[in-house]
Image (cartoon, helix red, strand yellow):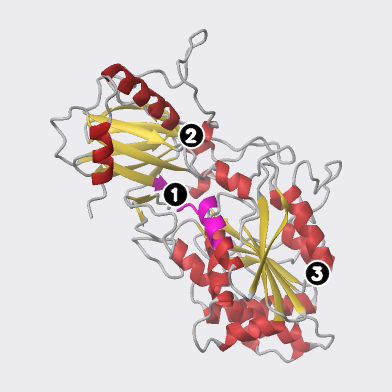
Amino acid sequence: MNLFRPFARRHRSFSANRETRRLLTAVAAASSGICSFSTPLPLHPTPGSTCAFPRPFLSPSARASTMADDHDGAPPPVRVSISSAFDSGNIRYGSVGRDPDAAAVVRLSIVPDPHTELEDTSHMQSFAFRSVVSAACDDDDNAPRTVRYVVTNAGNASYPSAWPGSTVFFSARYDPHDPDGDGDWVRIPDTSYDAAAGTLSWSHVHGPRGSSVHFAYFPPYTYDRHLAFSGRCGTLPAARTRSLGRTLDGRDIDCVSCGTGPQQAWVIARQHPGESMAEFYAEGLLERLLAPAPGDAAAERALREFTWHVVPNMNVDGSTRGHLRTNAAGSNLNREWDSSGDYEAPTLERSPEVYHILRDMDRTGVDFFADVHGDEELPFNFLAGSEGCDNWGDRLRSLHGAFHAEYCRSNSDMQQKVGYEPDEPGEGKTCICSNQIAIRFDCLAFTLEMPFKDCMSNPDSERGWSPLRSKRLGASLIDPVLYVQPHLRSKEAFWNTLPIEDAYVRPSSKY
């Protein structure tokens, strides 16, 4: 079947005159933020000018720019259009120029999050955008073209030390509903960071006859995919999908519950919206719980022993807006789990996501807790425990050690030696989620971190750490949870009976 044939028939029957067609083209172009005709209308009218058509509002991180006639120096031999006007998009166009080694050099900048009051900063690091490259002349459209992309404010990112060793992802056939999440996302090995200039750059060879490519710090997990997955979960008899409350932008805070066991296991993901690998992790966990493979006795037992509560995305507003660490109000949710001095938290005005979830946790109780994140700097999967909490002792240390050891045995992508330097006793901040839950419910609670970079435990030069590997790590969570389940609420000195290989390993950030 020719997919273009219905459109061709409609096009032939269209009898409007040339000027009418041009006006309709202008309206369509304004809606997308891209003007491609010979005398483009301005995307953003100058003061005092007027527009003959309505222009929808797009936040700075969701604007698109046409660059065929917007360049520094001699015009490049290509047309380049940059757009982040899509779910999770973030980039701002600066300029386009020429280079001896490339058909064009495109200068871009990351759009910061809203200002965070508690931390007094505007976070930024992650980005995602679409680039459309075509010949400047319609008659010269048969050769591949190399375009150099330069992020000019990378040195001002929240974690500039994370750029060395980072590689940007690209996809020429991006499908947000790809079952594995990987699609054809692959790494660009020539990604480089110039610390002196504070720039991140990479090159891409765009194919002939035009090329549309998506670039991202890590492949997005879109809100559309989130809604579709939550909807599918709700159709399964083992699952109960519910809204715990609403975000500041009016979105539901989805929670998928399953199982009938007496112990309550809570897993939350993506408090920091730029860490999309966390939601892929949650998807992998729920797929194994709700649709286990034939003969998967562990998944069946997990549903008998526990009632699971999984929040796949804590920060749906920030995710959709393309933020790195904050929600719509500029709040870093992982600092909103308790008040800090005069700063009250959580509140419905600044952090309704935390407010509603903590209230539901108080209702159900918590016996096991995991807070799933991504880390920009360390190229490993690791856990950060509650070592700095007042109730850290033989019981929680042994639970953490046994759980972590079994996780390593269940999935070789997990390791114990490298991680954050633990807090000293009594210095754990209760505004941080896992510390708050460990103290509030006296339970095994930790933060799980996955890398933005490649995973040095099992390197993959083509994809590095990826959505699919994140899903598999999520599915693997069940095995170590079952391993420690008999001891989670034990009143016995069970640590005296654990094998030596289950001993707690104090991590270090040095590797």
Amino acid residing under circle 2: Asn
- The crowding category of the residue bearing disc 2, from other C-alpha atoms within 10 Å (few below 14, some 14 to 19, many at least 20), is some
Seen from the viewer's position, the closer of residues 271 and 500 is 271
Q: Please tell me in which quadrant of the rendered image residue 371 appears.
A: bottom right
Q: Please tell me in which quadrant of the rendered image residue 369 appears.
A: bottom right
Q: Tag 2's secondary structure?
A: loop
Mark 1 or mark 3, which has the lower sequence index? 1
* Residue drawn at (82%, 71%) of the image: 442
Q: Which residue is denoted by mark 3 in the rendering?
A: 364
Residues rendered magenta in the picture: 215-230
457 to the left or right of 443 = left
Which label sits on residue 164? Answer: 1
Q: Tag 1's secondary structure?
A: loop
The quarter of the picture where the N terminus appears is: bottom left
Q: CA distance from mark 1 to mark 3?
A: 44 Å
* Residue drawn at (78%, 67%) of the image: 438
Q: How many numbered marks have been drawn onto this rendered protein structure? A: 3
Amino acid residing under circle 1: Pro
Front of the two marks 2 and 3: 3
* Residue drawn at (65%, 48%) of the image: 251
In the rendered image, residue 209, in percent from the top left (x then y), is placed at 19, 40
Amino acid residing under circle 3: Thr
Which label sits on residue 153? Answer: 2
* Residue drawn at (39%, 54%) of the image: 175
Q: CA distance from mark 2 to mark 3?
A: 45 Å
346 to the left or right of 477 = right
Mark 1 or mark 2, which has the lower sequence index? 2
